[in-house]
Image (cartoon, rainbow, N blue to C red):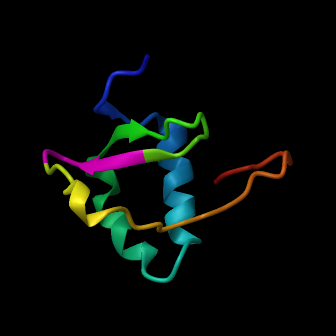
Amino acid sequence: MTNFPRPLTDEERTLVRWMLQHGEPGAKMYLEQLDEAVVSGGCSCGCASIDFQIADRHPDPQQGMTILSKFRHLNAPVTLP
């Protein structure tokens, strides 16, 4: 079982940066927070979705979540910058 919060791995940080750069309108404004982001949880269904927390600020669960980037993996090799 994974302990939360935990730091992002280098691979996660690279992928999240790319997803924010190519995500939903307005997603790029969150790039400046990426250096302070930690993984605060994950989806209970077993998918690869993860939740973020910025520094020591705890998200308000009453506000729900905002999807900033949504992509499907098609089993193709992916090369990130």
Q: Position of residue 20 (x, y in %)?
A: 49, 66
Q: Is residue 17 left or right of residue 73?
A: left
Front residue of 10 and 49: 49
Of residue 7 and residue 65, the one placed in the foreground of this image is 65
Q: Residue at position x 37%, y 38% from top?
A: 41
The residue at the far left in this view is 56
User: Dominant secondary structure of the magenta stretch?
Assistant: strand
Identify the residue at horizontal 34%, vertical 33% (top origin): 7
Front-most of residues 39 and 36? 39
Q: Residue 66: name its quadrant.
A: bottom left
Quadrant where the N terminus sits is: top left
Residue at horizontal 59 percent and vertical 41 percent from the top: 48
Front residue of 3/8: it is: 3
Tally of numbered tags: 0
Q: Is residue 64 above or below residue 24?
A: above
Q: Residue furthest top?
A: 1
For this view, does 77 lie left or right of residue 17? right
Magenta span: 51-56
Q: In the image, residue 54 lies at what x, y percent?
A: 23, 51
